[in-house]
Image (cartoon, rainbow, N blue to C red):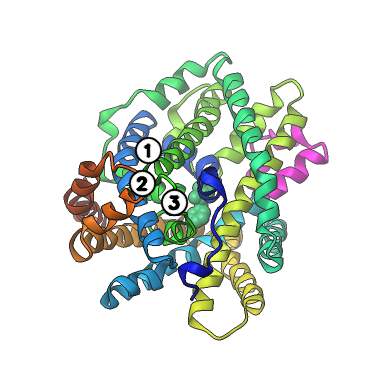
């Protein structure tokens, strides 16, 4: 385990924010946020998400980054250093990236496939309603693209060329944002978009349920790379004089802003091309891949824009999958004597084998519907990590910070670089509101799952 002095530090003030944003911004914003917003009632999901982001997300991100910067260590060692008894929290957090990486790579494979589709001039075919379902229900096609994505991620981690990828994505990311804004403007100026816009922005409180809140919390963790130790590791590389609180705000604004734009391309897009918002509640993981090809098909030059778009999305996905794979490799590096390169190969093979379940879950294994009618194995893995383990990790982190090491430990760390402007909010969230809220949400989702109550 490297100590603080051996850790290379991010250069400059903006270096940390960019690196953390590279991990945060990915398929969570583009693929996951829009389909959840569609599924959980549009405006109400948006409202719950934003409120949670500026309160709970803020507090947890401050805590994680400060823990990392204070100890100079990555997740399990950081907890162990502060309190031996809490080393177990590091082990639970470790389960999260291990579960996410395989299915994240399956979706990354879908993105790679769509690059091929556009580059080979099949944009009209992709706009067909059945193109996506025909693709994912096959056996070999999705596996091959998924394998390519895992290989690409593994090669970067194996040869240690993350820096190169980061440099490229620093250019690609702003282009992706600008392009997404352009696509969103195109969509919302189409006839028929108003029903979609209304659905997306106007909260319908009758759709508010514990499921909506749980989905929003899970999405918050996922999208901001929280509750799995990643931000602790990033924090350990952060210089002491960088304004921690301001950095957290910048990451949050960037991540949430981009998710909102992605939703704006996709949710009203459904209203424009299907003529109604009625089926939005039935949206699933395929939404982005079904809607965007229709948008591109109706856009002048759409076949080129579509190709460019998916190439940029691939980069956003790769920076995230690389940070996931890095984390998984370092988890095993801390616990075994194996060499880093051997571990990269083993992790890549393991990721591929486990991911096969998610990939085949839309085809030959589609009879396995663990979460009920119409759900897939991918939904299952996604649910276990984001709606079960991450809320538990977050709850334990709040207890640890609020009552074991005490919030002042974090406040002192934040104050090394600036005044702690929202300290009160931070303390109240970590000690009271977040833990109570998380317990309520977890209990109600268990009761809901057992069919005991419907909340
Ligand atoms: N936050 C990333 C995204 O939105 C996903 C991710 C989660 C990346 C955890 C790294 C760690 O796509």
Q: Position of residue 395 (x, y in %)?
A: 26, 59
Could you tell which of marks 2 and 1 lies nearer the N-terminus?
Answer: 1
The answer to whether the residue labelled 2 contacts the one labelled 1, judged by CB atoms less than 8 Å apart, is yes
Q: Label 3: which residue?
A: 222
Query: Answer yes or no: do the residues labelled 1 and 3 have beta carbons within 8 Å?
Result: no
Disc 3 packing (10 Å; few <14; some 14–19; many ≥20): many
Q: Residues within 10 Å of mark 2 (few under 14, many from 20)?
A: many
Toward the right, the furthest residue is 120
Mark 3 vs ligand 1: CB below 8 Å: yes
Residue at disc 1, secondary structure: loop
Mark 1 sits near ligand 1, with its Cβ under 8 Å away? no
Q: Could you say which is closer to the camera, residue 90 or residue 353?
A: 90
Q: Which mark is residue 40?
A: 1
- Specify the label residue 215 is tagged with: 2
Residue 427 x/y as whole percent? 21, 49
In the rendered image of this protein, does residue 279 appear above or below residue 408? above
């Amino acid at each position: 385990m490297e100590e603080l002095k051996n850790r290379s530090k991010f250069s400059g003030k903006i270096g940390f924010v960019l690196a953390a944003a590279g991990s945060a911004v990915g398929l969570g914003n583009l693929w996951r946020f829009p389909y959840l917003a569609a599924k959980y009632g549009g405006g109400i999901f948006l409202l719950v998400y934003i409120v949670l982001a500026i309160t709970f997300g803020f507090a947890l991100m401050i805590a994680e980054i400060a823990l990392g910067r204070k100890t100079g260590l990555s997740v399990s060692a950081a907890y162990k250093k502060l309190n031996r008894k809490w080393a177990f929290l590091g082990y639970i957090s470790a389960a999260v990236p291990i579960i996410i990486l395989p299915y994240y790579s399956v979706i990354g494979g879908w993105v790679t496939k769509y690059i091929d589709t556009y580059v080979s001039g099949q944009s009209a075919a992709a706009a067909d309603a059945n193109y996506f379902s025909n693709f994912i229900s096959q056996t070999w096609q999705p596996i091959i693209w998924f394998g390519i994505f895992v290989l690409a991620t593994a090669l970067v981690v194996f040869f240690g060329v993350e820096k190169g990828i980061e440099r490229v994505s620093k250019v690609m990311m702003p282009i992706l944002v600008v392009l997404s804004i352009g696509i969103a403007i195109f969509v919302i100026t189409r006839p028929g978009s108003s029903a979609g816009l209304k659905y997306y922005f106007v909260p319908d409180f009758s759709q508010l349920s514990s499921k909506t809140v749980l989905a929003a919390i899970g999405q918050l963790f996922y999208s901001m790379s929280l509750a799995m130790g990643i931000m602790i590791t990033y924090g350990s590389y952060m210089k002491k004089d960088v304004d921690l609180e301001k950095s957290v705000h910048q990451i949050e604004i960037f991540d949430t802003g981009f998710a909102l734009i992605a939703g704006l391309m996709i949710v009203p897009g459904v209203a424009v091309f299907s003529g109604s918002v009625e089926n939005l509640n039935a949206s699933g993981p395929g939404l982005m891949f079904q809607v965007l090809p229709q948008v591109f098909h109706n856009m002048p030059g759409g076949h080129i824009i579509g190709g460019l778009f998916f190439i940029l999305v691939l980069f956003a996905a790769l920076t995230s999958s690389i940070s996931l794979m890095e984390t998984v490799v370092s988890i095993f590096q801390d616990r075994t004597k194996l060499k880093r390169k051997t571990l990269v190969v083993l992790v890549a093979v393991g990721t591929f084998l486990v991911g096969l379940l998610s990939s085949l879950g839309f085809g030959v294994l589609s009879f396995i519907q663990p979460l009920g009618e119409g759900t897939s194995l991918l939904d299952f893995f996604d649910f276990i990590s984001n709606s079960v383990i991450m809320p538990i990790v977050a709850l334990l982190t709040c207890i640890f910070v609020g009552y074991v090491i005490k919030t002042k430990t974090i406040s002192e760390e934040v104050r090394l670089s600036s005044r702690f402007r929202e300290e009160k909010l931070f303390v109240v969230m970590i000690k009271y509101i977040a833990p109570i809220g998380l317990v309520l949400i977890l209990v109600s989702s268990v009761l809901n799952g057992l069919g005991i109550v419907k909340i």
